[in-house]
Image (cartoon, rainbow, N blue to C red):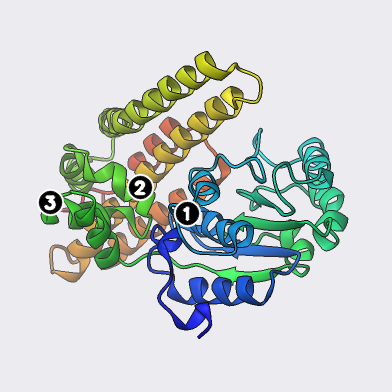
């Protein structure tokens, strides 16, 4: 019986709610991997975990997580599985040049090498042009796995050279079940799962966040505090942003633990090749994404208040509620352009009506 007819091995345990993707990848590994893959799906859908599991199966020809090579790969530490993260706001020509060079290097320990290229939805046109030939024709020993939340225009040509594997947001029930299996109580697990909107990594942070309920309540009640004046809008925005700042504490604590662990490795083995700069850059990106996610989810809760007001008979000004929801969703879309969050939130709240009277 082939491996794809049996339950996935332990290396796949951290890939949650992606049975179709796992089946495709196991089949591909069994038949022999192609030169390049593109994993597409939202943040937190365990794309990276799937890439590591797939790399482990390619390198070890098996699915056991206890094997030495598999353990290193699943932790992101194997010398023949190179994980590349963007070093700036986008993947530009210079970073693409570095990726081409890394792809050209021979495996260190064995006969196979896997490159996992993260966040390729942040790819500049000049970076795409530089990478195209390498993705089309990497060395025979190398398999390339590209991860992207979505496929922007600049990634279309590269996408056409890859085998595409789609990932989807994880259902709240599956996220909650995973959190419970990790020791979170069921009520907190479900609250975090619903707030995380299918992002398991974010759900893990929220599950240990005692102030989650307070933040959701603050955003939900914000429309009842507005009176059309700039002073109240600014005061409300300041309070909401203060709650978002405090919400980053669990992430900061995790970052501090990672830095301590890295410092211990540097002390034992030296700093060369330690990835200290990359770790610092990743922490900064994670904090920025955390803030954006918090604000996005808060604004969705804000919009929910106007929807409930309109649908539950809380006002006769249904059009006013609809316009408020439209403005909020415009603000959510604007977050992708990395605006000044304080000014964005103040301007939005100043434009919104009181949820009781709705129209001024």
Mark 2 vs mark 3, CA separation in Å: 17 Å
Residue 59 on image: x %, y %? 63, 57
Residue under circle 1? Answer: 43
Label located before the other in sequence (2 or 3): 3
Residue reaching furthest top? 267
Q: Position of residue 227 (x, y in %)?
A: 22, 40
Query: Which secondary structure lies at badge 2?
Result: helix
Disc 3 secondary structure class: loop
What crowding class fits label 1: few (fewer than 14 Cα within 10 Å), some (14-19), or many (20 or more)?
Answer: many
Label 1: element kind: loop
The location of residue 251, given as percent across then percent down, is 35, 33
Drawn side of residue 220 relative to residue 33, left or right = left
Q: How many marks?
A: 3
Asked if residue 230 shows in the view, the reply is no
Horizontal arrangement in the rendering, residue 267 relative to residue 80 (left or right): left
Q: Residue at x 47, y 54 (%)?
A: 43
Whether residue 266 is visible here, answered yes or no, is yes
| In the depicted structure, whether residue 109 falls above or below residue 248 | below
| Residue situated in front as seen by the camera: 311 or 335 | 335
Q: Looking at the image, tell me whether mark 1 or mark 3 is earlier in sequence order.
A: 1
What residue is drawn where x is 35% and y is 42%?
294
Mark in the foreground, 2 or 3: 3
Q: Earlier in the sequence, mark 2 or mark 1?
A: 1
Disc 2 crowd rating (10 Å Cα; few below 14, some 14-19, many 20+) is many
Q: Nearer the viewer, mark 1 or mark 3?
A: 3
Which label is found at residue 306? none
> Mark 3 highlights which residue?
185
Q: Which residue is mark 2?
A: 202
Camera-nearest residue between 205 and 359: 205
- Closest to the observer: 48 or 65? 65
- In this image, 112 relative to 20: left or right? right
């Amino acid at each position: 019986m082939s491996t794809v007819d049996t339950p996935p091995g332990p290396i796949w345990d951290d890939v949650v709610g992606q049975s179709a993707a796992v089946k495709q990848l196991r089949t591909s590994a069994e038949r022999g991997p192609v030169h390049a893959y593109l994993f597409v799906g939202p943040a937190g859908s365990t794309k990276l975990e799937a890439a590591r599991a797939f790399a482990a199966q390619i390198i070890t020809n098996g699915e056991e997580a206890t094997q030495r090579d598999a353990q290193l790969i699943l932790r992101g530490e194997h010398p023949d599985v190179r994980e590349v993260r963007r070093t700036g706001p986008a993947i530009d020509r210079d970073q693409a040049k570095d990726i081409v060079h890394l792809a050209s290097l021979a495996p260190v320990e064995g006969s196979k090498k896997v490159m996992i290229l993260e966040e390729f939805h942040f790819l500049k046109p000049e970076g795409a042009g530089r990478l195209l030939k390498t993705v089309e024709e990497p060395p025979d020993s190398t398999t390339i796995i590209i991860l992207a939340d979505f496929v922007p225009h600049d990634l279309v040509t590269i996408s056409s050279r890859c085998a595409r594997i789609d990932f989807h947001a994880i259902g709240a029930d599956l996220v909650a079940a995973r959190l419970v299996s990790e020791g979170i109580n069921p009520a907190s697990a479900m609250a975090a799962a619903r707030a995380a909107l299918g992002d398991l990594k974010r759900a893990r942070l929220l599950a240990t966040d005692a102030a989650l309920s307070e933040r959701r309540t603050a955003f939900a009640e914000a429309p009842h505090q507005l009176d059309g004046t700039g002073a109240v809008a600014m005061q409300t925005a300041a309070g909401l942003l203060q709650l978002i700042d405090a919400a980053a504490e669990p992430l900061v604590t995790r970052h501090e633990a990672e830095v301590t662990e890295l410092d211990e490795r540097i002390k034992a083995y030296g700093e060369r090749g330690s990835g200290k700069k990359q770790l610092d850059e990743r922490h900064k990106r994670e904090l920025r994404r955390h803030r954006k996610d918090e604000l996005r989810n808060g604004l969705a809760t804000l919009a929910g208040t106007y929807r409930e007001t309109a649908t539950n008979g809380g006002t006769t000004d249904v059009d006013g509620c609809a316009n408020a929801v439209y403005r909020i969703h415009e603000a959510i879309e604007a977050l992708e352009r990395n605006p000044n969050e304080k000014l964005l939130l103040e301007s939005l709240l100043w434009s919104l009506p009181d949820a009781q009277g709705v129209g001024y």
